[in-house]
Amino acid sequence: MAESGGAGKPADTAVQGDEAAGKAHREPSVLNGDCGIPVAMVTPGGQAGGGGADSVGTPTRMDGKPEIPRRSSIIKDGRQRKERKKTVSFSSMPTEKKISRASDCINAMVDGSELKKVRSNSRIYHRYFLLDADMQSLRWEPTKKESEKAKIDIKSIKEVRTGKNTDTFRANGTYDQLSEDCAFSIIFGENYESLDLVANTADVANIWITGLRYLISYGKHTLNMIESSQNNMRSSWLSDLFDEEDVSNTRQITICAAVQLIKKLNPGLKNVKIELKFKELHKARDKSSSEVTNDEFVEVFHDLCTRPEIYFLFVQFSSTKEFLDTKDLMIFLEAEQGMAQVSEDTSLEVIQKYEPSKEGQLKGWLSLDGFSNYLMSPECHIFDPEHKSVCQDMNQPLSHYYINASHNTYLIEDQFRGPSDVTGYIRALKMGCRCVELDVWDGPDNEPVIYTGHTMTTQIVFRSVIDVVNKYAFVASEFPLILCLENHCSLKQQRVMFQHLKKILGDKMHIDPPKPEDCYLPSPLQLKGKILLKGKKLGTTCTGSEGEVTDEDEGAEMSQRMSIDSAEQQTIAPKKFQLSKDLSDLVTLCKSVEFKDFPNSFQNQRHWELCSFNEVFASRCACDFPGDFVNYNKKFLARVYPSPMRIDSSNMNPQDFWKCGCQIVAMNYQTPGLMMDLNIGWFRQNGNCGYVLRPAIMREQVSYFSANTKDSVPGVSPQLLHIKIISGQNFPKPKGSGAKGDVVDPYIYVEIHGIPADCGEQRTKTVNQNGDNPLFDESFEFQINLPELAMVRFVVLDDDYIGDEFIGQYTIPFECLQPGFRHVPLQSLTGEILPHTYVFVHVAITNRRGGGKPHKRGLSVRKAKRSREYASMRVLQIKAVDEVFKTALLPLREATDLRENMQQWLT
């Protein structure tokens, strides 16, 4: 079918803004790649794999990609791995051209690109577009028009509009299948016609958008303007650095010196890669000298240190200049980064802090390098700095907080044969843990020892542990520390324990009895600097120096689980033992009692009494009595400890019990992985002080919340989280990988952890053989029904691994997300920060109906309403049938608008 009409149709007069980054909803079971495969290097023709043109002049539908089987990143089940031959490259010079400045865009446009031309009749045509060498007109082929008519004069272009924001796009039957990031429109002529195009990748779209905007502003003088402004900033700054290194004033420096200078400017680069780049440049120029000139230094820096994704972001705000002035930067800081009360002085402060060139600092200009420095700085990390210190109300009762807790803190390996060591306490306390365990038994020489009874774990002296507790108790947090005491000692050694506690901890011990008139425990602020002892306590009727209580023995429970004879387990009755009154009196606000059932607890339990729940029993309570469990935890402290079956020290999912309101979920700190990532990430949100205020719906007596809700929470406004995974930086090879070389094939999972209604995950495509600066450019959307309990986890994995696929992760509470363009610092499996390793993302948050907190929103969200999901018709290529059903599209869209508008008015 031949094309009909002119190059386009009249554009709608109202110019809409760019759509939200990452707003389009995607089904969680599909690995999306709407735009093809955007990578750091793109060919001038935009061929990034797939998406080839059909036969000349043949219209095709823009169908979505086929569903790809997904693999859970939480449960590592088996997966089918595609066969792919390993390739080895001995060159760092890619065959593709890196796009990182406006002149690169112009040159790529002259070479041309395949673009899809969109018409309003559900037709899409593959065409090859190119810019004339004289930069006066834009042409496309093939066409049935005369060659002189299949072009647009650059002078006639009024606007380049990003996204799907013309009537042509909206009327196209495949609207929902066209990628927002790959679409753009050229508005031209006196009648404001539109030429509506879709690129194979977002990179190619950015090339054309950027190049055309420069051409509109500067015409045939564009390249001259670009070169002059480029020389005035980056080149002069780098030349000054080069001259400082050139102490002999020969206008040359050694390769070694040049490598170290670039490494200093970009620490994430590997020395061998920089050196190889210089050697390849010399070889291409038939140069035998090992000295580096200023021009060579600038060229290598440009190739290695310019990030295309940051460049394209930069030019969106630079108004076709090669720098941001104070007003440009103000718009970016306020609209995208969510800064409040931004002024030109704010912009100048940023420029003075991050702009490397003297000229830029003097004139108040931020160059691309200064912009990159700012985006890579701690100011632009994804974690909101407000949460790096205590920022929550600490005057609530103790039961209203989640408390960072450790299980069998003394163990540094498994639960049955592992060694015990005081370093376990040091590590936990330094990490902000506020509840540690002491399993105390009679030891030699009348000195109590700590270990797991009935097992082969080694022993450590009780006194040495109390010394460590005294030293490190309040290093990471000033708020109260709970010592969970499992006492299995004789009366004689109990007295020794009492003496050590009193003598070593002294006034730090909280010994004031609870006030009878109180209904709740004191607040963390009231107990600041105090150590609470959790354990068994004698009744008030006991007048002697000792009395009898029920034994607590988690070690015996584990030993029973390991016994072959299950019948024998059931016959073991709870033991009784003698408790010293002196030791009993040290237990004040955390008296250990046995849990029977919820009705009994609601009627008889006192607010200073604490129950411990086995993980399995707690899960049963959460399943069978979700509402009662939440209400129980509004007043009483509940401690959950791992199942005795976890002899390998594996961890339960703390979210399973936090959603029930359980305050103390004891974790095996010695075992890294997903569950510890969640625990560590969760307690970051309040200055890592070990206490996090629970959601209001879990604290207020009049509220009702079920832990197993799979829908929105009454009284809580759902939030929409838009996350765009843009790129990665300096991904290392997995630590346990058996593969040779350093090349990785990274992909990223975005996981949401929270109540059942919120849990989900999405993954990006794989970027093959690029760990240095892989470009993903994929957007995801999640509905968060209970934001206060939600967490976001970024996981980077290697798709072509041998032995180990884990590259890095970062876990952050939803409430700590900063909006805008942010860098996510990745951590290793054991929690250490991976140097210079980041994921670059865009974050925007709105409420379910399109509103949102202003400080949590970005420009791309504010500029347009969230797109509506309209019904679409599948074209059967049977003209009679297609024509009949086409008439239903408009009434369906109108009905959808009526329904959505009514819902918005009602809310």
Image: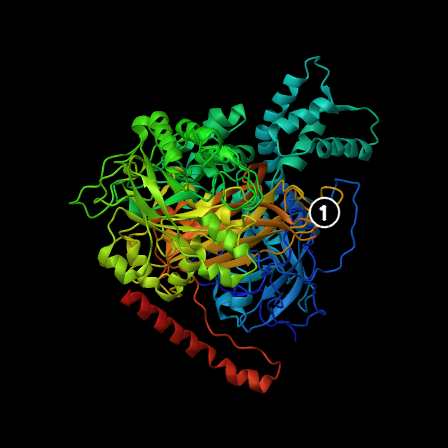
The location of residue 52, given as percent across then percent down, is 70, 63
- Is residue 375 among the parts visible in the rendering? yes
Answer with left or right where residue 57 lies relative to residue 600.
Answer: right
Q: Residues within 10 Å of mark 1 (few under 14, many from 20)?
A: few
- Quarter residue 874 falls in: bottom right
Residue that lies at the very extreme toward the top in this rendered image: 248
Residue 809 versus residue 446: which sits nearer the camera?
446
Q: Secondary structure at mark 1?
A: loop
Quadrant for residue 229, please give it: top right
**Looking at this view, is 18 or 144 the one in front?**
18
Residue shown at 46% from the left, 71% from the top: 870
**Quadrant holding the N terminus:** bottom right
Residue at the image position 44 percent from the left and 57 percent from the top: 572
**Going 29% across and 27% down the picture, which residue do you hit?**
507
The C terminus is located in which quarter? bottom left
Above or below, 839 against 563 in this view is: above
Q: Which residue is mark 1?
A: 96
Q: Report x, y in % for residue 119.
A: 56, 69
x and y percentages locating residue 417 in the rendered image: 58, 44
Res. 820 visible in picture: no
Q: Position of residue 79 (x, y in %)?
A: 66, 61
Which kind of residue does numbered mark 1 sit on?
Glu
Residue in front for this viewpoint, 370 or 322? 370
